[in-house]
């Protein structure tokens, strides 16, 4: 053999690829269908976690692409940490399909809640990627229940694995950068939310502070008005009380003065001045004639004199001498 027409070989590979794609759509309409710009799959419809941390990686143990992927994640500038579980296998050659599929099955059966499955390998010739154009691998990726990210390392054509996966990237490094950017996007949204909360809280605090100041001023003004009104009422009541108390005291003083006059008029001194006398028997004032004993002395008190007398006789008196 002198030479091989590579154009003819690559043309045949493309024909096989297109036939495989047509078969995937025809035989698996429940989870693979044509879509604008490519293909829709069940895997593409899965929600990608806002934060990707727990990752299952299917790669070759000796692949430089695996080292690039790991290095990019480990040295990300944001300090993100990742938990990576390796599922090593051969990632080239059409004869290694079964081994590759068994690693996908191992991921599914692991029971781990992976955020994503990453399929990576380094660059190489077009024929090195034949395993990723395999029908069974494309079918498995399309219906896989965990979002699949590919970083297969080719720059020209997309493999069937890329077309079936949730998110295709060109290289293992790009796959790692996509994961970092996904997490960074979430952190940015959290920071924006935090900033919005701070701004809203500051605005709310300022608004509430204004409202409190307004309420405080209203309370102060109303309190002052109420206190002034009550002060006026108290002053008026005090004035009224003083007036009434003075009037009452004056009226009571007149009333007392009247009684004082009556008392003075009825006092023994004034009574004696009017010609009356006080009888004392046994040193006691008496108005009972029976206290005076015939032949025994008693006292008669006038205004400024006291006379000692002796009773010589008693007789009844009708009191008519002083009738007016």
Image: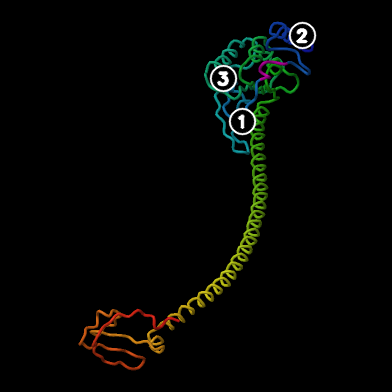
The figure's colour scheme reads rainbow
The residue depicted at 62 percent of the width and 16 percent of the height is: 144
Mark 1–mark 3 contact, CB under 8 Å?
no
Callout 1: few (<14), some (14-19), or many (20+) C-alpha neighbours within 10 Å? some
Mark 1 sits on what residue? 51
Q: Is residue 274 left or right of residue 67?
A: left
Residue 226 visible here:
yes
Q: Which mark is residue 249?
A: none
Mark 2 sits on what residue? 15
Give the mark nearest the N terminus, 2 or 1.
2
* SS state under label 3: strand
Q: Quadrant of residue 88?
A: top right
Front residue of 42 and 74: 42
Front residue of 220 and 3: 220
Q: Quadrant of residue 95?
A: top right
* SS state under label 2: helix
Residue 309 placement (x, y as % from top left): 26, 91
Span highlighted in magenta in the image: 40-45
Label 2 – label 1 distance at C-alpha: 39 Å
Q: Nearer the viewer, mark 2 or mark 1?
A: 1
Residue 40 placement (x, y as % from top left): 72, 16
53 up-or-down from 223: above or below: above
Mark 3 sits on what residue? 88
* SS state under label 1: loop
Residue 3 visible here:
no
Label 1 – label 3 distance at C-alpha: 24 Å
Callout 3: few (<14), some (14-19), or many (20+) C-alpha neighbours within 10 Å? some
């Amino acid at each position: 053999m002198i030479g091989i027409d590579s154009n003819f070989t690559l043309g045949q590979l493309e024909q096989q690829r297109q036939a495989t794609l047509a078969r995937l759509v025809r035989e698996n309409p429940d989870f693979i269908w044509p879509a604008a710009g490519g293909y829709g799959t069940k895997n593409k419809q899965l929600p990608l976690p806002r934060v990707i941390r727990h990752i299952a990686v299917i790669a070759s143990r000796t692949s430089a692409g695996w080292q690039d992927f790991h290095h990019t994640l480990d040295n990300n500038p944001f300090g993100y940490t990742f938990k990576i579980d390796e599922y090593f296998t051969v990632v080239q050659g059409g004869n290694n399909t079964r081994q590759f599929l068994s690693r996908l099955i191992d991921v599914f059966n692991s029971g781990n809640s992976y955020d994503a499955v990453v399929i990576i390998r380094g660059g190489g010739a077009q024929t090195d990627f034949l395993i990723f154009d395999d029908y069974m691998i494309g079918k498995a990726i399309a219906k896989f229940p965990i979002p699949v990210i590919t970083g297969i390392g080719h720059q020209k054509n997309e493999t069937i694995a890329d077309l079936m996966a949730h998110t295709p990237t060109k290289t293992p490094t790009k796959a790692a950068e996509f994961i970092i950017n996904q997490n960074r996007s979430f952190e940015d949204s959290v920071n924006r939310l935090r900033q919005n909360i701070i701004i809203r809280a500051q605005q709310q605090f300022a608004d509430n502070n204004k409202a409190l100041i307004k309420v405080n001023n209203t309370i102060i003004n109303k309190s002052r008005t109420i206190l002034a009104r009550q002060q006026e009422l108290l002053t008026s009541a005090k004035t009224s009380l003083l007036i009434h108390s003075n009037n009452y005291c004056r009226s009571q003083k007149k009333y007392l003065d009247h009684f004082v006059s009556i008392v003075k008029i009825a006092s023994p001194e004034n009574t004696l001045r009017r010609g009356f006398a006080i009888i004392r028997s046994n040193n006691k004032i008496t108005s009972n004639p029976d206290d005076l004993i015939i032949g025994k002395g008693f006292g008669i008190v006038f205004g400024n004199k006291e006379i000692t007398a002796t009773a010589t006789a008693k007789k009844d008196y009708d009191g008519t001498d002083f009738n007016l």
